[in-house]
Image: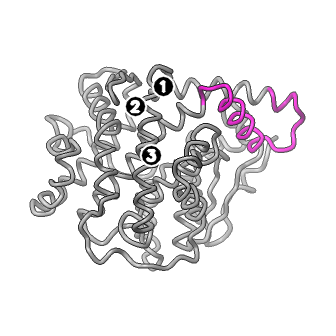
Amino acid sequence: MIFDQADLMPRPGRYRILAGPGSPYSHKVRAALRYRRIPHDWTVPLGGFDGSGQSEGLKAFGKRLLPVVVYPDGTPWNDSTPILHEMEALHPDAPSLMPPTAPQRFLARLVEDFADEWLAVILMAFRWTSDTDVAFCARRQMAGWLGDVDEPALTVGIEKFTARQQMVRNFIGGGDPTTHAALEAEYLALLDILERGLSRRLFLFGQRPSIADFGLYGMLSQLAIDPTPSRLMREHAVRTYQWTQWVDDLSGHQAAWAHNPAPDETLIELVALAGRGFRSMMLASAEAAGRGELRCAFEVGGAPLASVARPYTVDCWLWLKAMFAELSEEERGSLRPILEPAGFWGVLDFAPGEADRLKPFAKL
């Protein structure tokens, strides 16, 4: 299918989210814009992806990743985190995703990066390994991309997509089946933390969502659909399952941040969980990049994982360090009781030469 690029441009005064049907980052951005009541249109460009790559219509935007957010002036952009940060300045009257204090905002970004970078490894390991998950996920997503095509055409798309996504799974570190028990344990630990936390309050920083909550939602929106992680969520975390359905559209939600800015038990436990797989992966990636190596290795729950030392993952780690460096000494000290037990204290300072490799925190 070849479509006119003009059909994918935004209407006046609105953003257009060019999305993938199984893209957690697409759903993250849409949910955030819905909550902030920022005018937008959601489009999965039928035929825009054939299973192995973009078709000409979508490729014309010059972006390899999803979602592509086309701004009201017609400029396309990638990267959900910088986009959502920039929209804070562009739409100051909309409900903010940023908690009130600088230490809270740092913790929100840490949890968001944990979701965006580490939970993606778990999602891909679930999604592209077992026969049951592969069969459902490939068919579901390609049906969403291709629309009303006949069975032979859908089958071709499924085969291409499965091969591509299993390569991506291996690339980011989820390809070794011997590690999947450890990754499943990480997922179950996350569900346990969220399920208990939802009995106390609905979001990490009060009764209104932050950028961290939307980061978690993006991944959970897909884990709640894919066969194996969905079954585990429905068996172990019904509150979390329903929370995920609810957060999809919070356009009518109005509530306040917590009166007490101190981290609550759920946030402390999430940072502790991030101190396992997420911290190990980020440290290994940054250290490999510092040595000029393309691959890195680390452990999670005693299981050895290996992945490509992805440049973007290193960028995220350095941006997190830069945000930590911007805190005052008093603000950093207030975070020590939560960061130190999780293994983050000390590793968030720039290593020699790292600050020189810091890229601007900006859209792609």
Mark 2 or 1, closer to the camera: 1
Q: Main secondary structure of the magenta part?
A: helix
Question: Which residue position holds label 3?
Answer: 116
Give 290 or 281, whichever is nearer the viewer. 281
Mark 1: few/some/many CA within 10 Å (<14, 14-19, 20+): some
Q: Amino acid at mark 3?
A: Asp
Q: What residue occupies the far left of the structure in this picture? A: 329
Residue drawn 45% across the image and 67% down it:
202
Q: Which residues are magenta?
A: 128-155
Residue drawn 41% across the image and 57% down it:
196
Question: Which residue position holds label 1?
Answer: 171
Q: From what the image shows, is residue 39 above or below residue 289?
A: below
Q: From what the image shows, is residue 139 above or below residue 255?
A: above
| Circle 2/circle 1 CB separation < 8 Å | yes
Q: Is residue 5 magenta?
A: no
Residue 310 circle label: 2
Q: Earlier in the sequence, mark 2 or mark 1?
A: 1
